[in-house]
Image: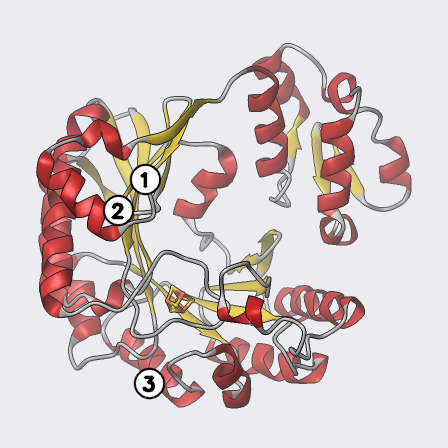
């Protein structure tokens, strides 16, 4: 690793498209794979990283995120091979945040120590619920006991920055059972907690079953979102993004770059990138990805490339930054776009009076109440003047 001065920063997202089984709600690109398939994929991933590295010349990498899928289906040796490729070909900062997503079912002996020794310094564990019946309903391949064993192994293995993913709006879930999950996780004191509402996506097993699922109604779901905000704030977590909570200084640095519109390059099938003003993505097909990399046809991996500029850039800026409770700095908006926020999106006075927005000096942000209806407000803004 190298010490660097002030250079443009870059994040790397590495997609690991393997899972032990498919959860009922999941529309991420992932599937079962044997060791041979995983090795072939890793080889392609490393090759792709090397080929893309010259594009990042002059930039330093300050976040790396192993997402999936289930990155912890790889073993520590696999992580080391990928990590060595990153270190060997990109200017990785000394204090870069290196996150790996982890499914509690993948907790082989020594995995955590191995990951930590490799350089992974943040673990994001998918728990979803502390209630085993809810986990079974979701089709998760683990119970709470397996999660706890993984969480403790991570702490023993040296991880002092752990995030836990939770879900609310699960079939048959009550506000009370979600409250118990929250209390259980708060009791473990992870540095970061994400709490997402379940969405029924087309193409998932839940979509086919949607008419028979006993989903909590809208009121119960919004009571769960409120409960998360209230209990986590009381427990010392900062609610910094619509679905994310962190102890002081423990925001996800990698995810922050998505919301701030900073550069990142994605590797692997279904990975998205935003690089030097252009968004592009890789097709969600692992076999085609390996094949394309082996042919050396790297430009074919940049699909649906769109240059984000003008009004689209302005709208993205608003939509992404307003997910953060930091909101928008109005002077920064004017500096970037040469116009005022209100000229583009209308007056915010009524929303302020209604308690949906706060204006603290130059900073415009949603309140907790506003964040819960932020989709509707953002739609109104984006329609303004049309
Ligand atoms: S573990 Fe994650 S990526 Fe894999 S199927 Fe379940 S939700 Fe999807």
**Residue pictured at 62% horizontal, 68% vertical:** 232
Question: Judging from the image, what secondary structure is the residue with disc 1 in?
Answer: loop
Give the left or right position of residue 66, taking residue 147 as reference.
left
Q: Are marks 3 and 2 in contact (CB under 8 Å)?
A: no
Q: CA distance from mark 1 to mark 3?
A: 35 Å
Which residue is denoted by mark 3 in the rendering?
149
Task: Say which label, 3 or 2, has the lower sequence index.
Answer: 3
- Picture coordinates of residue 249 (x, y %)? 46, 52
Task: Say which label, 1 or 2, has the lower sequence index.
Answer: 2
Q: Quadrant of the N terminus?
A: top left
Vertical comparison of 35 with 254: above or below = below
Pointer 3 local density, CA inside 10 Å: few below 14, some 14–19, many at least 20: few
Which residue is denoted by mark 2 in the rendering?
268
Which residue is denoted by mark 1 in the rendering?
282
Task: Say which label, 1 or 3, has the lower sequence index.
Answer: 3
Pointer 2 local density, CA inside 10 Å: few below 14, some 14–19, many at least 20: many
Vertical comparison of 108 with 239: above or below = below
Q: Are marks 1 and 2 in contact (CB under 8 Å)?
A: yes
- Picture coordinates of residue 175 (x, y %)? 71, 79
């Amino acid at each position: 690793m190298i010490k660097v001065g002030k250079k443009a920063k870059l994040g790397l997202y590495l997609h690991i498209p393997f899972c032990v089984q498919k959860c009922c709600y999941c529309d991420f690109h992932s599937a079962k794979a044997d060791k041979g398939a995983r090795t072939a994929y890793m080889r392609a991933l490393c090759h792709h990283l090397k080929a893309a590295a010259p594009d990042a010349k002059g930039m330093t990498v300050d976040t790396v995120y192993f997402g999936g899928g289930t990155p912890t289906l790889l073993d520590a040796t696999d992580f080391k091979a990928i990590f060595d490729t990153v270190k060997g070909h990109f200017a990785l900062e000394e204090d870069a945040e290196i996150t790996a997503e982890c499914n509690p079912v993948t907790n082989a002996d020594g995995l955590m120590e191995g990951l930590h020794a490799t350089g992974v310094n943040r673990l994001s564990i998918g728990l979803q619920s502390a209630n085993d019946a809810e986990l079974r309903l979701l089709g998760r391949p683990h119970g709470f006991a397996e999660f706890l064993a993984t969480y403790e192994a991570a702490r023993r293995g040296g991880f002092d920055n752990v995030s836990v993913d939770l879900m609310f709006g699960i079939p048959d879930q009550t506000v009370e059972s979600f409250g118990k999950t929250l209390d259980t996780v708060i009791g473990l004191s992870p540095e970061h907690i994400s709490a997402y509402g379940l969405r029924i996506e087309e193409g998932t097993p839940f979509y086919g079953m949607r008419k028979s699922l006993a989903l909590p109604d809208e009121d119960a779901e919004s009571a769960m979102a409120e409960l998360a905000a209230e209990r986590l704030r009381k427990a010392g977590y900062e609610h910094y993004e619509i679905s994310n909570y962190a102890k002081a200084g423990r925001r996800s640095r990698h995810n922050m770059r998505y919301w701030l519109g900073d550069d990142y390059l994605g590797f692997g099938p279904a990975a998205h990138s935003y690089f030097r003003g252009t968004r592009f993505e890789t097709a969600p097909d692992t076999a085609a990805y390996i094949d394309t990399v082996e042919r050396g046809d790297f430009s074919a991996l940049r699909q649906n490339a769109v240059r984000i500029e003008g009004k689209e850039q302005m709208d993205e800026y608003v939509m992404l930054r307003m997910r953060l409770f930091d909101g928008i700095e109005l002077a920064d908006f004017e500096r970037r776009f040469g116009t005022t926020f209100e000229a583009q999106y209308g007056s915010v006075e009524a929303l302020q009076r209604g308690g949906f927005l706060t204006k603290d000096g130059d900073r415009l942000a949603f309140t907790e109440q506003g964040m819960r209806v932020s989709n509707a407000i953002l739609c109104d803004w984006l329609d303004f003047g049309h």
